[in-house]
Amino acid sequence: MKTILVTAFEPFGGETLNSSWEAVRPLQGCQIAEANIEVCQLPCVFDTSLKHLYATIEHVKPEIVIAVGEAGNRSNISVERVAININDARIPDNAGKQPVDTPVIIGGPTAYFATLPIKAIVDELKRVGIPAKVSQTAGTFVCNHVMYGLLHYLTQHAPAVRSGFIHVPYLPEQATKYSDAPSMAVEMITVALKIAIESALRNENDIAIAGGTTN
Ligand code: PCA
């Protein structure tokens, strides 16, 4: 039986919940295709999030890692293509740290590509009527930091383990606080993540399909 680790984040930026955690939490202990799902919540803190992530990978020994985070301005399930070696925080993290233009890993490569089948995931989500796209940037806050650190760590320590990052919208109860914020129901996000997991298990390599992206 394979193990898939799915991570999400604690609330940040003045929110009382984080949509990524609300959608990921129900997956704990689920069996999807031939895999067991393990979930873990990461602190929204530079560096500490990575220490927590690496310790969990060592403990769980997953075949695939999917990190999930909230992107309140997005209306789609955003399957990230690339992580860059930069921290440039718009707001302080949950420990009050606000790095500006520092590397995630000193001396690390400029960027890493996700090793998940990003086009296949987007295609399968759209087929079942869930808005999804390939995203070309995970930003420069803690989510990009975790995606970069994850790909760097696995490249060095467990290159056979595939991984990537998915950004998810606000939940409707979060969006009601703003005048024009997009949102998605938590049940739909959870289903989307299950589909992403199935797709990652089924597709060792990505499919070549044009138009998975809108930016
Ligand atoms: N979203 C933030 C960090 C934690 C989260 O859920 C981001 O997009 O960087």
Image (cartoon, rainbow, N blue to C red):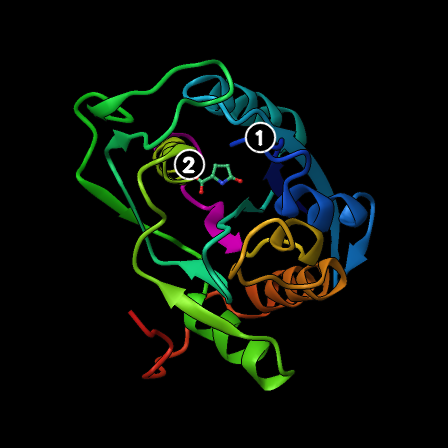
CA distance separating discs 1 and 2: 9 Å
Residue 89, quarter of the rendered image: top left
Is label 1 in a helix, a strand or a loop? helix
Foreground residue among 96 and 48: 96
Please give left or right for residue 100 compared with residue 184 in the image.
left
Q: In the rendered view of the protein, which quadrant contains the C terminus?
A: bottom left
Residue drawn at (77%, 49%), measured in percent from left and top? 27
Specify the quadrant of the image occupied by residue 97.
top left
Q: Does the magenta stretch include residue 103?
A: no
Specify which label sits upstream in the sequence, 1 or 2: 1
Estimate the x, y position of residue 159 in percent, counting from the top left.
Answer: 40, 41
Q: Quadrant of residue 107?
A: top left
- Left or right side of 81 for 133: right
Residue at the spot of label 1: 57
Counting other residues with Cα less than 10 Å from the Cα at mark 2, is it few (<14), some (14-19), or many (20 or more)?
A: some
Residue 82 image position (x, y, % from top left): 31, 52
* Residue appearing at x 58%, y 46% in the figure: 63
The residue under label 2 is 154
